[in-house]
Amino acid sequence: MSHHKLAFLGFGNVGRALAELLLRKRDELGSRHGITFSVTGIATGSHGAAVDPDGLDLTAAVRAVESGGSLEQFSKAPTTDTMSFLRATGADVMFENTPVNYQTGQPAIDYIRAALNLGMHVCTANKGPVVHAYDELSNLAASQRLHFFHESTVMDGAPIFSLFRHAIPVAQLKAFRGVLNSTTNLMLTRMEGGESFDEAVRYCQQVGIAETDPSGDVDGWDAAIKVAALVTVLMDVPLKPQDVQREGIRGITPEKIAAALADGKRWKLVCSARREEDRIVARVQPELVGPDSPMFSVDGTTSIVEFETDVLGDLSIVEANPGPHTTAYGLLADFINAVS
Amino acid sequence: MSHHKLAFLGFGNVGRALAELLLRKRDELGSRHGITFSVTGIATGSHGAAVDPDGLDLTAAVRAVESGGSLEQFSKAPTTDTMSFLRATGADVMFENTPVNYQTGQPAIDYIRAALNLGMHVCTANKGPVVHAYDELSNLAASQRLHFFHESTVMDGAPIFSLFRHAIPVAQLKAFRGVLNSTTNLMLTRMEGGESFDEAVRYCQQVGIAETDPSGDVDGWDAAIKVAALVTVLMDVPLKPQDVQREGIRGITPEKIAAALADGKRWKLVCSARREEDRIVARVQPELVGPDSPMFSVDGTTSIVEFETDVLGDLSIVEANPGPHTTAYGLLADFINAVS
């Protein structure tokens, strides 16, 4: 058995879902992977932080935050900032779940760098550090024999990155295409049901999957960031979101939707990238897809990616019903793979 | 770098595709995984066998078999039978590619047991040993700190088994459904194009994917064996093909196909299994699927499986264009994972 001390940076919906998943899977982690754990630190944006080298009561911590309370009551060690928090935890694995910053990846990049320098594996669901500092962070991790894993950054819990890492070794990725932004896919599905663009946006805001300013989704930025992350990691070519040719869904009118349906087709916001000679052509744009495409049946918040490699026929992964619990599962899988 | 001696048992289309893939990926195996290899033995059904502890010329061996010649000319050591062949190779990895025996899994089971007892990892594309001796062989492998891997037995090169082994650890499989027999799927696709059942069977025989006696495919036996293999390995419940409720596609007439198409649906030979209380309900049967199902767009020889677990939303894997090269790739991936 190997014991691991875990630190949580960020304890929102995903962090708390991960805490509950860790508790639920505690026995299996022991029996199937020889892993035991204690959580030695949790830091939040608005509920304080707690550090206990002997292990915090995770259930009590979840309850405190969900009832609007503070974590400070559980702390056995004072911490002044994130760096002192990380040091005080004495953790060997850090889960980074702070809010994503699409422009710079900060301050998550600084936190991850600090954790790696303190000897911690890092598991993150945050796309920012992957598109803005992948090479630096993965090299830093490798130089310390640590892992920087980020399974949940694209398609939540669907195991895209570990697929290439373990399941299809020496496969070279030539191209991919798919539907990676579930918010716009749900909007397009709602518009097929008769809603206007504004109504579809409002619906997605009401159910909590679109922001007050929906432009990150509808203008294709989130999709472009996911394309950049996949290209950077899986094609080994650093690519920034602004290098992705990008067109959102604002131009898809109810009339266009109706015409497509009458023709037996559907509009999808398609993400794609292809290696061409010495460069990558990467795109996010609305495309018409017919029933012969695996993208055709991808409804609502379901997402799909189709990989073209040098060794397999086309391989597609489809993920339905994502949510904080699937994002949390990706982090748990990263943890197991990092320490196994 | 770690050097591995490889033995090939069976050197048909898949074995030779694996030989060519090993040669093509030799540099990457070294640079990305620190693996070097030599092939110390190849045994065939009708082209003799060759053993050379210093390593055979793989290109020459492929050429000899493809031109109808014998491998004996390359042999540096006499072998009288498969057991003496295995011993003489001194290999630490054995690729088992002998013809499948659906009823008993023999003689492949004996060969695999012998190889494991000689200290070899075993990678096989043969479904027989998985459905007839999985527990014995995987326990024997584990007791010797060896691996018994079989990625290519279901969905060829699509990484179903290593997905659960590495990419989604501690996930419990509750149910799966999919289209796993590509021959019947191609037949149904041809019938949608206007062919009769007999014409569709003949076409599949002409292109070499159906046997002279097509009953293994059309009566659902191959599909039932794949269901049994998935249940046995991924649900940890030994299941025999005859325990799968099984109905083939002989009852799907051109009239039924036409009626389905007129209704916007398609007939698919659907494989499924579900854990219910303390038992597994496993089925192979024709089902009508509509465009809301990811199975709807699965044409020709493409296959799909949809997994329902306790930790993720539904996760589907779709594999297009399988062939000997994808089966070979699954064996290569097994080799890399076995020795890494």
Image (cartoon, coloured by chain):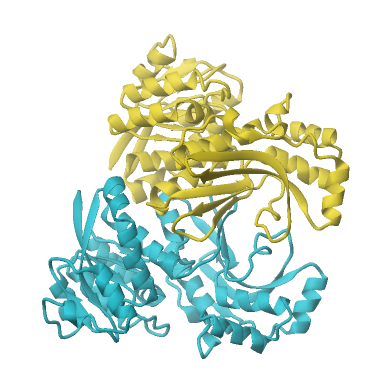
Chain colours: A yellow, B cyan
Query: For the point 74% across and 64% down, which residue is it?
Result: B290
Residue at position x 59%, y 28% from top?
A: A242
Residue in the image at 31% along x and 77% along y: B10
Q: Position of residue B324 (x, y in %)?
A: 43, 70
Residue extending farthest to the front is: A277
| Quadrant position of the N terminus of chain A in the picture | top left
**Left or right position of A297 against A318:** right
Residue A63 drawn above or below residue B229: above
Q: What x and y, as percent, mark residue A288?
A: 74, 50
Instruction: Please tell me whether residue B329 is drawn above or below residue A236 in the rendered image.
Output: below
Decide: is B188 above or below A141. below
Q: Is residue A142 left or right of residue B180?
A: left
Placement of the C terminus of chain A among the 4 image quadrants: top left
In the rendered view, would you say B119 is above or below A276? below
- The part of the image, by quadrant, that contains residue B123 is bottom left
Residue that extends furthest to the top in the rendered view of this protein: A80
In front: B209, or B271? B209
